[in-house]
């Protein structure tokens, strides 16, 4: 009823559930539409009857002179039983697709496995670091999604992209087009929820519980996801992205993720200074930069930070806003995406680090955090030895240098 | 035991001689003014107090809602901070459910149940006063968290040592109204009890616990009253439907509240003593909290809805001039809804990874609950069918209730289907759904009840034109605010997010929703203001302005403190309507008159005992803040509670005899025969 | 001690006294209360059959802590107190105040013995390394049995109040018997709940070598 009057563009917005791009979301959408049609029919019937009755049986002049209707109403058993039966019948119509969809969306279906198992599409390079174990060849690709306040960490245990191996992927992950992918959902603190509306309905990440879902994307592109279970102060800032690429490109992406960061060019003095600051200001304690610093395992991996389209739990977008808007309008497709814009990225880095490290600005007023409560600001909570100083202060020049350093981490 | 036998009946309680209780203290029976209201055991006065507090907290919750909507009107807005937003939606939900709808329903229970069943009071009048004051103090505790929060923001605490030692400085709860653990609980091993949130959560835990005591005590009382204090001839199947729905609601409360009580105790032990019930780092299962919460939480939804259904089932027959279609099946379906309400809790948890079998089972059970709900709507339709509808403010609001509730029910059917729900859960679609049920449904139902019974309560008739304008604004504003949220949810906007980016396509409808929310807010304010003005200055009206059907309309307006001058004897279901227009008259028992009727004594003790809860409620969060010696406040509170109960037990029931004018109790048919 | 509006008036619609009815309603509610607590314990017990780890880091199995003879004794004592409570109620109905006092004193005494056993048990378990903090088992065990103990303590307090009240001369007749009967209902209920707790928490640990939850641990000597 409400959807009437919305243009097609309104139904295909970035996180629309009405624009499924894979079999799981499609199944859920189909069940939803079954309920919609049932409800529309009932709405017209019951609502129409109600309006009709209210108009038809309104009191008319002269009614007050008629004798009162005193007989006790007992209802009409035939009508009652008939209506109850009809309601049950109507519910059966939606119960059947519901049941089949519950089992279909629970686990990767057998018919999807032959084309989706790793051996069917992922190149295995014997004798190199990039190979994967023979044992997993018959499995579909698994991605571990780990929720933390307030960002997602993604790992590919079968392919060696894990936090333990210093190769985890924060906030944006990549999956191959047309292949079923199993997502293992874990949480390291409170309850979060994994939701990419165009690919699959949500499932919660519960601490102490092993949840999962599966999804498959049938079109390449850039998909928008968001945490859907309230998880504290900055819940609204806990976003993530899924990039869907051709299978061949996916293999390349995995190789790239395993590569260390290139050395900072000697000519880039600012970046060199930034790198020193990165160590001096304790950033290294939590953040990993492959090839540069290897101590951090707690915070997002920054080895390839400059190649990512988002920052700070995907809240800050590193793309040029206007260019992206123009592209979406041109293609009529929100999955189309422009590349990272270095100027935007740098501005975001400065904004993000600047606000998080400094609790009070020069005037002594509390700064507006990009993400209130985030751990860069409040790491005191974790009682990490030596990290109890909450007021890390950066000068503008220091921020600039840090940003320049991070910009080199492609 | 019966002190009243020593005294001659009086015509008015101010004529009473001062009487001492068994403890030697003077009973406040002759009190007037403030003392009278504080010590009253009269169910009608208690009902009015419940109503006044509920309307006040409705407005508080409404202001919170408007702040939320203002923040969401524009993308990337910074009208309020993230934390303040989270506190606002938590307190908005908690306030509306526990301090708005439930006490407003309780106001109707209190005022109406004894009148509808032909009784002079509830079974335990002092316990009733205790329920009221415990609710009031629980509400104070919950809202006191705001004062601490604002004092903290204003920097008043900065110089205190305990404040400097706090790691978490949120003083108002910010976990949402279902406070999922472990966000509301703890982490860390071996009793470390590290937390994600500050003392706001402690305020919430103790506040809800106190409100639970109030609800439980009231429910025991009302079940007892309805089962045991019916007038002669008032068999169960002659009970007015509102009374029936009250009975079902009270049964739901006594069976559902223990689950939340236990859950809150466990959470409290986690936070205060380092227990591991919901602590995931020590093996606790956060999902247990969700089960316990929703075993309470789903019946709670019906606790909110059933009284409104009862009200509508009274309003419709009155204004169609026709008895309720299918009375037995409406009563039966109400009971079935209550029963099934305990079997569908996991549909709030479809996304927690229950596995396909439980998901399927709860999906089907949830669909099943649509059947008795549908039956109610069909029977309301049947009541309208063939009637002569008189349009009055309560009737318009009741019809609005049916329409909105139907819409809310339909979106409910949509997410009874688990796969569809996995896209809707925790999105604005759900917000739209339950506001259609709880605001479009319950609030309109309760407003219909207010406008319907207001002439009975105060003997004055609210202005109909203002009532129509307010109802129109409420219905228009409501649909404008919550209709678009269906779209927003389907467009992927998650609930409980304090802001959103431009570019997601949510801007326009959020803006519209905010405009709608303000229209709705103004409408509710006008509707309430109309009532408050009427209570003091409104036009006087007769005893039976609507051609009522149930016993309460046979009484004078406002109702005298003894209710029935002589106890009625009932001969039909719509007893008073039959009395006026049919063959079956209401008879009277041979009581009252010069011999008087027995009235319960007023007492300070319920208020005193409840006051103990207030101290406990303040003391425990203050202990959690680390304020020195706060533990003594808790101990003092427990002491006051026990002292109050002790004195209450020992003061004796008392009571006095009040003369009643015998020819006034039961109306002569001629008086009301003209319509 | 009565709060009924119509205590002396016409009989109630059902013929059941208000006080008795409200006590039954309270007990229905309390059933759900204990049901929830017992479910919590059983769910976790099934989930973590391995017991708990004590302060020295030893894996301990709860069966090794239990002193089933002592708990059986205290259970028996509580059952006997119920018997005395029934005698006290019956004496009150017959108006035999002296017999009532004697029996109620017995109930109070037995109730105190039960509470004493529980205090001893808690202290003993605590020294054996089971705390509310070091395991889920400790949390559920102490909170469940502690809540029951609180119910017993409130019952004892109530009976002491009734005992002294009986000397004021106001505890007599139909209403007095009713007051005692209602307290008796409460006391019996608390007993029945203990039987369930005794079965669900203690006895099931003795079905089979490692209890029905089937611990994978070897039984550690006491």
Image (cartoon, rainbow, N blue to C red):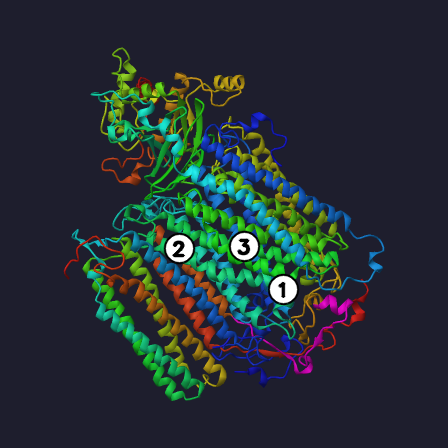
Q: Quadrant of residue C77?
A: bottom left
- Left or right of A222 on screen, residue A69: right
- Tell me the subunit letter for badge 1: B
Residue B177 visible in the snapshot:
no
* Badge 1 or badge 2: first in the primary sequence: 1
Q: Which residues are magenta?
A: B575-603
The residue positioned 26% from the left and 31% from the top of the image is: A297
Label 1 residue SS: helix
- Left or right of C63 on screen, residue A325: right
Assign the N terminus of chain A to one quadrant of the image: top right
Residue furthest to the top in view is A267
List x then y, in percent, for residue A408.
31, 17
Q: Which mark is residue B112?
A: 1
Residue situated in front as seen by the camera: A116 or B147: A116
Does the magenta segment cover residue B584?
Answer: yes
- Left or right of C142 on screen, residue B509: right
Foreground mark, 3 or 1, reads: 3
* Badge 3 or badge 1: first in the primary sequence: 1
List x then y, in percent, for residue B272.
33, 54
Residue situated in front as seen by the camera: A196 or B520: A196
Q: Residues within 10 Å of mark 1 (few under 14, many from 20)?
A: many
**Mark 2 on the same chain as mark 3:** yes
- Tell me the subunit letter for badge 3: B
In this view, B411 is above or below C69:
above
- Read off the residue under disc 2: B263
Residue situated in front as seen by the camera: B355 or B28: B355
Q: Which mark is residue B302?
A: 3
Q: Quadrant of residue B356?
A: top left
Label 2 residue SS: helix
Label 3 residue SS: helix
In this view, A12 is above or below A381:
above
């Amino acid at each position: 009823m409400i959807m009437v009057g919305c243009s097609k563009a309104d139904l295909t917005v970035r996180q629309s559930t009405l624009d499924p791009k894979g079999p799981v979301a499609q199944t859920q959408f189909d069940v939803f539409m079954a309920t919609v049609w049932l409800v529309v029919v009932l709405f017209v019937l019951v609502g129409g009857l109600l309006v009709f009755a209210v108009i038809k049986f309104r009191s008319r002049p002269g009614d007050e002179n008629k004798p009162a209707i005193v007989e006790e109403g007992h209802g009409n058993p035939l009508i009652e039983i008939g209506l109850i039966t009809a309601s049950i019948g109507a519910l059966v119509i939606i119960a059947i697709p519901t049941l089949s969809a519950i089992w279909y969306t629970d686990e990767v279906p057998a018919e999807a496995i032959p084309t989706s198992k790793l051996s069917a599409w992922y190149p295995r390079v014997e004798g190199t670091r990039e190979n994967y174990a023979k044992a997993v060849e018959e499995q579909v690709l698994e991605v571990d999604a780990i929720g933390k306040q307030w960002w997602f960490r993604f790992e590919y245990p079968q392919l060696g992209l894990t936090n333990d191996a210093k190769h985890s992927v924060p906030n944006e992950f990549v999956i191959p087009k047309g292949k079923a992918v199993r997502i293992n959902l874990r949480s390291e603190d409170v309850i979060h929820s994994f939701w990419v509306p165009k690919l699959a309905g949500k499932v919660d990440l519960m601490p102490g519980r092993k949840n999962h879902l599966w999804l498959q994307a049938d079109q390449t592109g850039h998909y928008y996801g968001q945490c859907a279970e309230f998880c504290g102060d900055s819940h609204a800032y806990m976003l993530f992205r899924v990039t869907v690429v051709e299978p061949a490109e996916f293999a390349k992406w995995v190789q790239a993720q395993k590569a260390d960061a290139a050395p900072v060019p000697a000519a880039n003095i600012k970046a060199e200074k930034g790198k020193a600051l990165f160590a001096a200001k304790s950033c290294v304690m939590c953040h990993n930069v492959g090839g540069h610093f290897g101590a951090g395992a707690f915070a997002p991996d920054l080895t390839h930070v400059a190649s990512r389209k988002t920052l700070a739990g995907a809240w800050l977008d590193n793309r040029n806003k206007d260019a992206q808007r123009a592209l979406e309008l041109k293609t009529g497709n929100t999955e189309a995406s422009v590349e990272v814009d270095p100027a935007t990225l740098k501005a975001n880095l400065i904004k993000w680090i600047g606000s998080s490290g400094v609790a009070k600005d020069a005037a002594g007023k509390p700064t507006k955090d990009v993400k209130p409560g985030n751990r860069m600001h409040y790491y005191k909570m974790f009682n990490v030895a030596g990290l109890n100083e909450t007021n890390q202060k950066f000068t503008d020049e220091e921020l600039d240098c840090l940003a320049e350093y991070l910009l080199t981490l492609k | 035991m019966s002190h009243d036998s020593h005294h001659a009946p009086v015509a008015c309680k101010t004529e009473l001689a001062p009487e001492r209780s068994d403890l030697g203290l003077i009973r406040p029976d002759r009190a007037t003014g403030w003392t009278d209201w504080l010590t009253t055991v009269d169910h009608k006065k208690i009902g009015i107090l419940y109503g006044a507090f509920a309307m006040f907290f409705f407005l508080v919750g409404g202001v919170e809602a408007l702040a939320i909507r203002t923040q969401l009107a524009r993308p990337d807005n910074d009208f309020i901070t993230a934390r303040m937003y989270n506190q606002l939606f938590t307190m908005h939900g908690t306030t509306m459910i526990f301090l708005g709808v439930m006490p407003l329903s309780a106001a109707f229970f209190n005022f109406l149940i004894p009148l509808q069943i032909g009784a002079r009071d509830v079974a335990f009048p002092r316990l009733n006063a205790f329920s009221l004051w415990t609710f009031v103090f629980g509400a104070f505790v919950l809202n006191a968290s705001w004062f601490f929060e604002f004092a903290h923001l204003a920097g008043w605490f900065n110089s205190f040592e305990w404040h400097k030692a706090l790691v978490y400085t949120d003083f108002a709860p910010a976990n949402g109204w279902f406070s999922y653990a472990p966000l509301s609980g703890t982490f860390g091993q071996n009793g470390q009890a590290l937390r994600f949130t500050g003392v706001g959560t402690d305020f919430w835990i103790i506040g809800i616990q106190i409100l639970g005591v109030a609800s439980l005590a009231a429910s025991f009382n009302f079940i007892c009253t309805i089962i045991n204090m019916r007038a002669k001839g008032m068999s169960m199947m002659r009970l007015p439907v509102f009374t029936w729905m009250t009975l079902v609601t009270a049964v739901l409360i006594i069976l559902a509240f223990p689950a939340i009580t236990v859950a809150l105790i466990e959470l409290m032990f986690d936070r205060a003593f380092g227990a591991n019930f919901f602590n995931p780092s020590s093996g606790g299962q956060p999902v247990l909290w969700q089960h316990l919460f929703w075993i309470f939480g789903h019946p709670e939804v019906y606790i909110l809805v059933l009284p409104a259904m009862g009200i509508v089932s009274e309003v419709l027959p009155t204004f169609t001039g026709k008895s309720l279609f299918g009375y037995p099946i409406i009563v039966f379906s109400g009971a079935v809804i209550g029963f099934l309400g305990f079997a569908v809790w996991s549909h709030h948890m479809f996304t927690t990874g229950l596995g396909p079998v439980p998901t399927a089972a709860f999906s089907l059970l949830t669909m099943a609950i649509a059947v008795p709900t549908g039956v109610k709507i069909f029977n309301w339709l049947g009541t309208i069918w063939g009637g002569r509808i008189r349009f009055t403010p309560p009737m318009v609001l009741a019809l609005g209730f049916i329409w909105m509730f139907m819409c809310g029910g339909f979106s409910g059917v949509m997410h009874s289907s688990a796969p569809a729900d996995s896209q809707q859960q925790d999105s604005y679609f759900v917000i739209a759904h339950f506001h259609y049920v709880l605001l479009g449904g319950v609030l309109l139902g309760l407003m219909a009840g207010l406008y319907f019974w207001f002439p009975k309560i105060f003997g004055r008739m609210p202005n109909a034109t203002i009532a129509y304008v307010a109802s129109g604004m409420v219905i228009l504003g409501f649909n404008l605010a919550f209709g678009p949220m269906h779209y927003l949810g389907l467009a992927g906007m998650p609930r409980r997010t304090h802001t959103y980016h431009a570019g997601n396509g949510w801007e326009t409808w959020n803006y519209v929703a905010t405009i709608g929310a303000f229209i709705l807010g103004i409408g509710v304010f006008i509707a309430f203001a109309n009532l408050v003005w009427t209570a003091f200055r409104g036009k006087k009206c007769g005893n039976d302005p609507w051609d009522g059907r149930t016993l309460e309309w046979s009484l004078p307006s406002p109702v005298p403190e003894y209710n029935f001058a002589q106890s009625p004897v009932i001969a039909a279901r719509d007893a008073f309507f039959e009395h006026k227009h049919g063959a079956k008259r209401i008879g009277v028992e041979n009581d009252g008159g010069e011999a008087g009727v027995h009235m319960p004594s007023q007492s300070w003790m319920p208020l005193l005992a409840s006051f103990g809860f207030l101290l406990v409620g303040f003391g425990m969060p203050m202990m959690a803040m680390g304020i020195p010696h706060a533990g003594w406040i808790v101990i003092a509170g427990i002491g006051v509670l026990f002292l109050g109960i002790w004195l209450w037990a020992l003061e004796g029931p008392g009571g006095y005899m009040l003369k009643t004018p015998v020819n006034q109790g039961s109306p002569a048919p001629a008086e009301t025969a003209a319509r | 001690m009565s709060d009924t509006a119509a205590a002396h008036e016409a009989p109630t619609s059902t013929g059941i006294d208000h006080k008795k009815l409200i006590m039954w309603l309270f007990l229905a509610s309390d059933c759900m209360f204990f049901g929830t607590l017992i479910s919590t314990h059983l769910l976790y017990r099934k989930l973590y059959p391995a017991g708990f780890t004590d302060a020295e880091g030893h894996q301990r199995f709860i069966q090794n802590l239990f002193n089933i003879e002592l708990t059986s004794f205290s259970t028996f004592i509580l059952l006997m107190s119920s018997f005395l409570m029934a005698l006290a109620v019956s004496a009150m109905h017959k108006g035999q105040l002296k017999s009532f006092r004697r029996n109620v004193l017995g109930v109070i005494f037995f109730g105190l013995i039960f509470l004493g056993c529980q205090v001893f048990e808690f202290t003993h378990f605590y020294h054996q390394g089971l705390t509310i903090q070091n395991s889920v088992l400790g949390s559920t065990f102490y909170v469940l049995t502690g809540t029951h103990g609180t119910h017993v303590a409130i019952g004892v307090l109530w009976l002491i109040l009734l005992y002294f009240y009986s000397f004021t001369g106001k505890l007599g007749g139909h209403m007095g018997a009713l007051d005692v009967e209602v307290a008796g209902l409460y006391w019996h209920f608390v007993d029945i709940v203990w039987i369930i707790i005794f079965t669900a928490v203690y006895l099931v640990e003795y079905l089979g070598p490692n209890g029905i939850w089937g611990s994978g641990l070897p039984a550690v000597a006491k």
